[in-house]
Amino acid sequence: MALSKTERRQRIKSRIRKVVSGTETRPRLAVYRSNKEIYAQLIDDNAGVTLLSASSRDKEISAATGTKLEIAALVGKAIGEKALKAGYEVINFDRGGYLYHGRVKSLAEGAREAGLKF
């Protein structure tokens, strides 16, 4: 029986989450990608709280024009700058079952440019 695209992604996501988790000192950078938007969150899994978030729907970013790839890089830079301001330098990257390619890769590189290490 063939799996649907979302079922397949959920399986990959659970496989990744077995290994990747966030702590207070080293939070998890979780990525969610819809057809139109892209979202990133810094999460402390021990406390079960979202520490920071950034998305393509934020005012500064939604005002920018460009391709989805360019917007994803802006979201990465935004979450990176917020994280550094809050005192997080090293994080765990969680691609959320998506391939490390395209918009997910662009977001990760934007976060690295901002100064995050992972």
Image (spheres, rainbow, N blue to C red):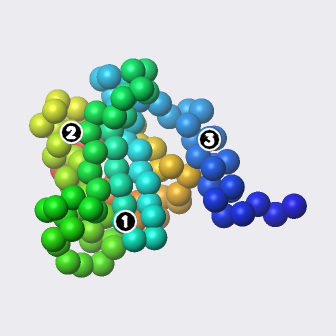
Foreground: disc 1 or disc 2 = 1
Instruction: Pick whichever, 38 or 114, lies toward us.
Output: 38
Q: Residues within 10 Å of mark 2 (few under 14, many from 20)?
A: many
Q: Residue at x 16, y 61 (%)?
A: 59
Compared with 102, 118 (above or below) is: above
Instruction: Pick whichever, 37 or 8, lies toward us.
Output: 37
Q: Give the structural element (helix, strand or loop) at label 3.
A: helix
State which quadrant residue 64 falls in: bottom left
Left or right: residue 72 versus residue 47 is left
Residue 83's disc number: 2
Q: How many marks?
A: 3
Quarter in which the N terminus is drawn: bottom right
Foreground: disc 1 or disc 3 = 1
Q: Give the structural element (helix, strand or loop) at label 1.
A: loop
Compared with 53, 102 (above or below) is: below
Q: Residues within 10 Å of mark 3 (few under 14, many from 20)?
A: few
Q: Give the structural element (helix, strand or loop) at label 2.
A: helix
What residue is disc 1 on?
A: 37
Which amino acid type is marked by label 3? Ser
Q: Residues within 10 Å of mark 1 (few under 14, many from 20)?
A: some
**Image coordinates for residue 10, horizontal then vertical, percent:** 63, 50
Q: Residue at x 37, y 65 (%)?
A: 37
C-alpha span from label 3 to label 2 = 25 Å
Which amino acid type is marked by label 1? Glu
Compare marks 1 and 3 and give the one earlier in the sequence. Answer: 3
Residue 14's disc number: 3
Residue that extends furthest to the right in the rendered view of this protein: 1
State which quadrant residue 3 falls in: bottom right
Compare marks 3 and 2 and give the one earlier in the sequence. Answer: 3
